[in-house]
RNA sequence: CGCGGGGUAGUGGAACGGCACCACGUCGGGCUCAUAACCCGAAAGUUCUGGGUUCGAAUCCCAGCCCCGCAACCA
């Protein structure tokens, strides 16, 4: 039985500035999915990275008087550091300036050329002679470039470029979506894409002339690959296309590309057409997530409503932030985040819910059983109810996680926290403890609470990896990072007599910050 | 008539033809193992507006108002 592979990607991020929380949002969601599949025994390859070949990056570096190469190196490190802080478990962090990517892109484009899908044509547009770049009408302010608004630098210019025959793939894309509607999820995003296709596809310019930064067009050094097309190709070069056939054959096609809704056109139309032209199998799915809003605006650099991910990790803890964004927003739709929302959810779910359940359970174990897990029998009605709740949580969690509904998945897992709390209210262990003759009942009641915690450690690991480790450690249970799912994810596996090692509060309440 | 999404208790979400549900917050009660945590109960909605279809509409149709995203060479 060969291990099933699972290859997933995030979009690569455009590195013109420091990372924001919206960047981590996609990383966190994709990481949770990667961990979920690893936990279920799949051979996961998780690719993420940086998009570095844009002309604007070259310009941003020069504007700061910095060498472009040094500039992207510095920013790539910063993004890697953010990923590390948040426990993003990528297998490769690709940079589009990596040598193997550059080589792979050129091989990719040669295939288009061989296939007759590239031709020379003229691109006409508004050109800023100072920036040496084309702009759209909408980019200009009163007909002037925003970088050089003090003088007239804009000219209407024609440039010879290479064009890709996107129009040739109109029918192939229609067929793709007819036969495999699941290619783009969720459905609302797919409908949007179908609308674009129905209105007809036009050929697109895929090269730029006279740039000094970017990937040279194969066999024509006067042209540079237009950065969007170079960027998309990272999904195949990241697993060895053009340079490492064995790895490429092992992981391609991708199981899912996780992206934001602003770039679905590129991933759901251009990308499959590009692959078809290059004679490469299509990925199985593009999964489009929503955005984080703060104060009614999309969280972004241009909206000026950044939440700094490094500061957020200091404030709430990286695990908590992972939980907060996924639980609050869900993943498919847009949702609101703010420090106030984080604070109240932190207290309600993490401190009062999960953290407090761990505290009360381990405290009772220490007090009543000298820090050893008691025997599970006799199993009374309340223990049965908790067990059913646990099994339901496992089922519902997996079903939700499978469809990237992380908010629902977390809600399913946390339903077990509620079930355990209700169980304590019903059985009242603190009362049983007063009657020595009922020691067995007391043990069974606490065992059920303990067992709920153990299962929670495994269920929550994809979202709260560090917390899950701490819970498992406190129960002397196998590490969620390495345990085989079928050997841990069943009720009743916690060994009686196991040592309990209570730790400090997992999520101390944020007392002063609740407005 | 560019395209798409959305307007539901104070807040955020769910239901998408059949008694309008959940969480947080608020109020009342209980408990004391626990991070003033936990448990039970209650109040709170003319489901954006106006028409229509239907035995019955938050849900379907028409018109309008408002918010958000996209609008293909910006990444």
Image (cartoon, rainbow, N blue to C red):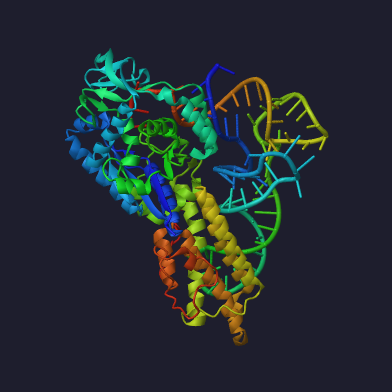
**Residue A155 rendering spot, x and y as whole percentages:** 27, 13
A9 or A138: nearer the viewer: A9
**Residue A307 rendering spot, x and y as whole percentages:** 38, 43
* Position above or below: A124 against A423: above
Residue found at x 32% / y 39% = A234
Q: Is residue A377 visible to us here?
A: yes
Residue found at x 18% / y 39% = A70
Residue found at x 55% / y 75% = A446
Residue found at x 40% / y 44% = A254
* Position above or below: A108 against A163: below
Locate the N terminus of chain A by quadrant. Answer: bottom left
Q: Is residue A357 visible to us here?
A: no
A430 or A387: nearer the viewer: A387
* Position above or below: A488 against A122: below
A473 or B58: nearer the viewer: A473
**Residue B1 rendering spot, x and y as whole percentages:** 55, 16
Q: In the displayed orientation, state which residue is furthest to the bottom.
A: A437
């Amino acid at each position: 039985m060969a291990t099933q592979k699972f290859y997933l990607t995030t979009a690569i991020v455009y590195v013109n500035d420091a990372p924001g929380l919206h960047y981590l949002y996609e990383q966190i969601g994709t990481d949770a999915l990667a961990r979920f599949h690893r936990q279920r025994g799949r051979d996961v390859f998780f690719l993420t990275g940086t998009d570095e070949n844009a002309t604007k990056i070259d310009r941003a570096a020069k504007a700061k008087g910095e060498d472009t190469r040094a500039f992207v190196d510095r920013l790539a490190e910063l993004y890697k550091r953010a990923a590390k802080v948040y426990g993003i478990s990528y297998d490769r962090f690709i940079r589009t300036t990596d040598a193997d990517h550059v080589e792979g892109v050129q091989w990719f484009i040669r295939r288009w050329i061989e296939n007759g899908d590239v031709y020379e044509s003229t691109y006409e547009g508004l050109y800023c002679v100072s920036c040496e770049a084309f702009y759209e009408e909408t980019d200009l302010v009163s007909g002037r470039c925003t970088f050089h608004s003090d003088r007239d630098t804009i000219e209407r210019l024609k440039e010879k470029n290479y064009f890709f025959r996107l129009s040739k793939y109109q029918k192939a894309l229609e067929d793709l979506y007819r036969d495999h509607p699941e290619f783009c999820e969720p459905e609302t995003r797919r409908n949007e894409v179908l609308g674009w296709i129905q209105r007809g596809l036009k050929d697109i310019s895929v090269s730029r002339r006279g740039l000094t930064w970017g990937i040279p067009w194969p066999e024509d050094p006067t042209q540079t690959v237009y950065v969007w097309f170079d960027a998309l190709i990272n999904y195949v070069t990241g697993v060895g296309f053009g340079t490492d056939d064995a790895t490429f054959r092992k992981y391609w096609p991708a199981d899912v590309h996780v992206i934001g809704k602003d770039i679905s056109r590129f991933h759901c139309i251009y990308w499959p057409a590009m692959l078809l032209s290059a004679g490469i199998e299509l990925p199985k799915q593009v999964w489009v997530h929503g955005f984080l809003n703060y104060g009614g605006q999309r969280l972004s650099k241009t909206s000026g409503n950044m939440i700094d991910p490094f500061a957020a990790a200091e404030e709430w803890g990286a695990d908590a932030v992972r939980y907060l964004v996924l639980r609050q927003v869900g993943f498919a739709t847009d949702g609101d985040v703010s420090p106030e929302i984080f604070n109240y959810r932190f207290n309600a779910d993490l401190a009062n819910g999960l953290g407090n359940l761990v505290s009360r359970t381990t405290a009772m174990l220490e007090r009543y059983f000298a820090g050893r897990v008691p025997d599970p029998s006799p199993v009374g009605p309340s223990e049965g109810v908790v067990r059913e709740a646990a099994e339901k949580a496992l089922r519902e969690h997996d079903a939700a996680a499978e469809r990237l509904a992380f908010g629902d998945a977390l809600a399913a897992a946390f339903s077990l926290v509620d079930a355990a709390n209700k169980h304590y209210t019903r059985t009242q262990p603190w009362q049983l403890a007063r009657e020595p003759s009922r020691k067995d009942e007391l043990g069974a009641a606490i065992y059920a609470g303990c067992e709920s915690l153990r299962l929670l450690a495994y269920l929550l690991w994809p979202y709260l990896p560090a917390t899950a480790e701490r819970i498992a450690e406190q129960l002397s249970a196998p590490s969620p990072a390495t345990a085989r799912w079928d050997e841990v994810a069943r009720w009743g596996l916690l060994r009686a007599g196991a040592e309990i090692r209570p730790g400090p509060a997992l999520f101390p309440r944020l007392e002063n910050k609740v407005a």
